[in-house]
Amino acid sequence: MTIAPTLAGSLDRSMARAVGWNAAAKWSSQILSWTSTIVVARLLTPYDYGLVGMSGLFTALAMVICQYGIGDAVIALRDITRRQTAELNTVSIAMGLALVGLSCALAFPLARFFSAPPVRYIIIVVSGTYLISAFLVVPRALLRRELRFKLLASIEMVRAIFQIVSTVLFAWLKFRYWSLILGYLVGSLIEALLTSYWKRHEFAIPNIAKLRRELKFSRQVLLSGVAWYAYDNADFGVAGRVLGGAALGNYTVAWTIASAPVEKIANLVTGVTPAFFSAVQTDKAELRRYLLRLTEILSFVTVPASFGLALVADYLVLALLGPKWSGVIGPLRLLGVFVAGRSVATILPSLLTAIGDAKFVMWTTIGSAIFMPIAFLIGTRWGTNGIAAAWVVAYPPIMVPMYHRVFQKTGMQLKEYVSVLTPALSASAVMAVMVVLTRSVLPVGYRPVSCLVLLVVVGALSYAGALLSFHRQRVTHMIRGIRSIHQGELSEG
């Protein structure tokens, strides 16, 4: 089945708007969050954050279980009936209630494990958000399937404002660590109320026999989410267990600096892609076109940012954190290289899940959850640098089956995919040469801040110059595409 050109153009404009609204909501929320964190951190203590962090190891996993699966089935399975959607809505609530019960049962053992009695009550109170999130799963998925990302972005912004204001207020009233928990609860409740107001859906008693396909798909996506959580956090567990607290601290800071900015950019795209991939799931040509376009756009920003971070890691750490954090430099260089590849690869499982191939994603992710911890354990022989190197060495092989499957499902050729990455990679190579040459002539002992600023300017100018010199046609084509989408929006308005 082939998507009509007019429909394809409409989807292009919808995706551009979706990414724009997603960017506005997430970056506005992030700026507010950073500001509030500075205020709240002055009112609370490291012990307060530590308690919430301990409980977060379990609550984050529980939230993955709560949010993965059913919503993805509603988006990906386009022929699902209204009755089946209502039954899945009931299943979601049942899962939320089960998670509440499980959290209450595990709260005391987890508190004993951490030797922190308050963790017990934090886990019990936070479990209320699982039930709130369960009510959101189906309505939020329906809004995404209908491509109503402007509304979703608005709801996210309102939620962020209420959560931030509540957290600051509770902290000012000396609620200590409870201010973080209660602020999160307020935000979740506001999001649930607004989402239910705009997209309410009925409930129905589930007919398990007739929901077999939908529940199987949901289970596969859920297991993928749990396996992803396991291997994505295994490096922290291995570092803390084998290398100790100081090494874990260095590695955590390196990971945060390397991944946070790039993942924020990548998430602007990956947050909206499942709905669009699902909309064209029967058209290989359109799937291929969207994948190539999104990969190219992401690579233009994330590849130079990641490589540039690796090139200036020492000056960045010394300028922003000081000499006592010199242990961050080594893993930060390696993680910068890794994040460059990961930023474009994150689209692949979203595409496969959106077209109904959740089983393959599940087994691939489970395999990663077995393979990556072994790689991290081997890497501990070389300290935090070895753990970071494990990502660089072991991640590409585990992604090979994913790439092969995507190419198979979309009819894509390897040379097509490489061609969209070539501009960013080649321009980044020029940037790297210029930065290394500049570093070689910098005087020893020169101020880190001045060196950092100089290298960033040299890197940015050399990257832009290389793109315009060697890939002007590709850059011009991309700019024209963005302009045409914008003009289409104006004409529609």
Image (tube, rainbow, N blue to C red):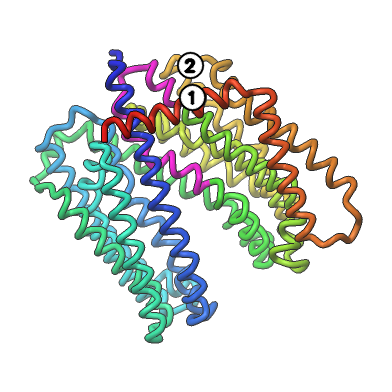
Depth check: give the residue in front, 110 or 191: 191
Depth check: give the residue in front, 70 or 376: 70
Instruction: Give the quarter of the figure containing the N terminus.
Output: top left
* Residue 116 locus on image (x, y percent): 47, 78
Image quadrant where residue 431 sits: top right
Q: Residue at x 13, y 37 (%)?
A: 84
Q: Which mark is residue 65?
A: none
* Residue 442 locus on image (x, y percent): 88, 51
Residue type, mark 2 in image:
Met
- The chief SS type of the magenta part is helix
Residue that mark 1 sits on: 292
Q: Residue at x 56, y 50 (%)?
A: 261
Residue 450 lies left or right of residue 110; in this view the side is: right
Q: How many marks can you see?
A: 2
Q: Residue at x 32, y 22 (%)?
A: 8
The stretch drawn in magenta includes residue 286: yes
Pointers 2 and 1 in contact (C-beta within 8 Å): yes
Instruction: Give the quarter of the figure containing the C terminus.
Output: top left
The stretch drawn in magenta includes residue 386: no
Q: Which residues are magenta?
A: 263-291
Q: CA distance from mark 2 to mark 1?
A: 9 Å
**Could you tell me which secondary element the residue under label 2 belongs to?**
loop
Tell me if mark 2 has few (under 14), some (14-19) or many (20+) residues whose alpha carbon lies within 10 angstroms of its own.
some
Mark positioned earlier in the residue sequence (2 or 1): 1
Residue that mark 2 sits on: 412
Name above or below for residue 124 compared with residue 176: above
Residue type, mark 1 in image:
Leu
* Residue 306 locus on image (x, y percent): 64, 43
Residue 178 lies left or right of residue 324; in this view the side is: left
